[in-house]
Amino acid sequence: MRVLLVEDDDRVADALVPALTRRGFTVDRQATGRGTLDRLTGVDVVLLDLGLPDVDGVTLCRNIRAASDVAIIVVSARGEIDDRILGLHAGADDYLVKPYDVGELVARVHAVRRRRGDPLDPRGGEVIEVADVRVDLARHEVTVAGEVVTLARKEFQVFALIAAAGGAVCTRERILHEVWGRTWPGANRTLDVHVATLRTKLGRPSLVETVRGVGYRLNGG
Ligand code: CA
């Protein structure tokens, strides 16, 4: 999957580019707002920092949307709800407030692509691979060392979220929100049961690692 990172801050870009590359993305970086519209060809997702020195980020977002059907995730240091609404109305698909976790960003990228129903790219883009674990998001299929593992729908969704974080922590909150759409008394217990079943079915008790009090992460090593 090809990502265009529009970000003027070198420190942010220097951290993000290798982190996304490690997770299988091809990343182009654009340090100014100007010129962005010329670089959209072949791009799947634009990560757009709203705070750019040369152009207004919201205007740029609107212009990208006018020029292309590319998925846009707006990233902003400004957390005001007004900005959020503004960003989404300007044509963005999703929104992240700095500082954010790379795992969360990766999961959002996959979620945006899924929601848009984007077709598989010829390289089989909607596949997450960590060590010998392979998660095919389009086919809802998980293989471990080449063997297909049959998962229930919610088990698959939980595992896909954890896998999409690429080794970063996926919080319980996020999983409950994305998979069940809500939380309730006893939700954590339900999630624990799903994860326990997952571990058994995957045949790798240490693959989904518990981060106590926070969530889960994939341990591909
Ligand atoms: Ca900035």
Image: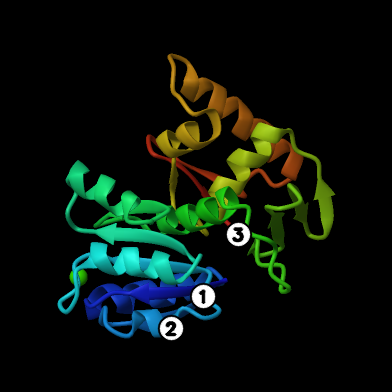
Q: Earlier in the sequence, mark 3 or mark 1?
A: 1
Q: Are marks 1 and 2 in contact (CB under 8 Å)?
A: yes
Outermost residue toward the top? 185
Residue type at numbered disc 1: Val
Q: Earlier in the sequence, mark 2 or mark 3?
A: 2
Residue type at numbered disc 2: Arg
Q: Identify the residue under disc 2.
A: 39
**Image-based side of 198 in relation to 55, left or right:** right
Q: Is mark 3 within 8 Å of ligand 1?
A: no
Q: Is mark 2 within 8 Å of ligand 1?
A: no
Secondary element at tag 3: loop
Secondary element at tag 1: loop
Q: Is mark 1 within 8 Å of ligand 1?
A: no
Image: 39 above or below 100 = below
Q: Quadrant of the N terminus?
A: bottom right
Q: Are marks 3 and 1 in contact (CB under 8 Å)?
A: no
Q: Identify the residue under disc 3.
A: 220
Image: 160 above or below 121 = above
Q: Identify the residue under disc 1.
A: 43
Q: Nearer the viewer, mark 3 or mark 1?
A: 1
3D distance between C-alphas at marks 1 and 2 = 8 Å
Q: Quadrant of the C terminus?
A: bottom right
Q: Nearer the viewer, mark 2 or mark 3?
A: 2
Residue type at numbered disc 3: Gly
3D distance between C-alphas at marks 2 and 3 = 34 Å
The x, y position of residue 189, in whole percent, is: 52, 21
The x, y position of residue 193, in whole percent, is: 61, 25
Image: 185 above or below 21 = above
Give the residue drawn at x 34%, y 50%: 88
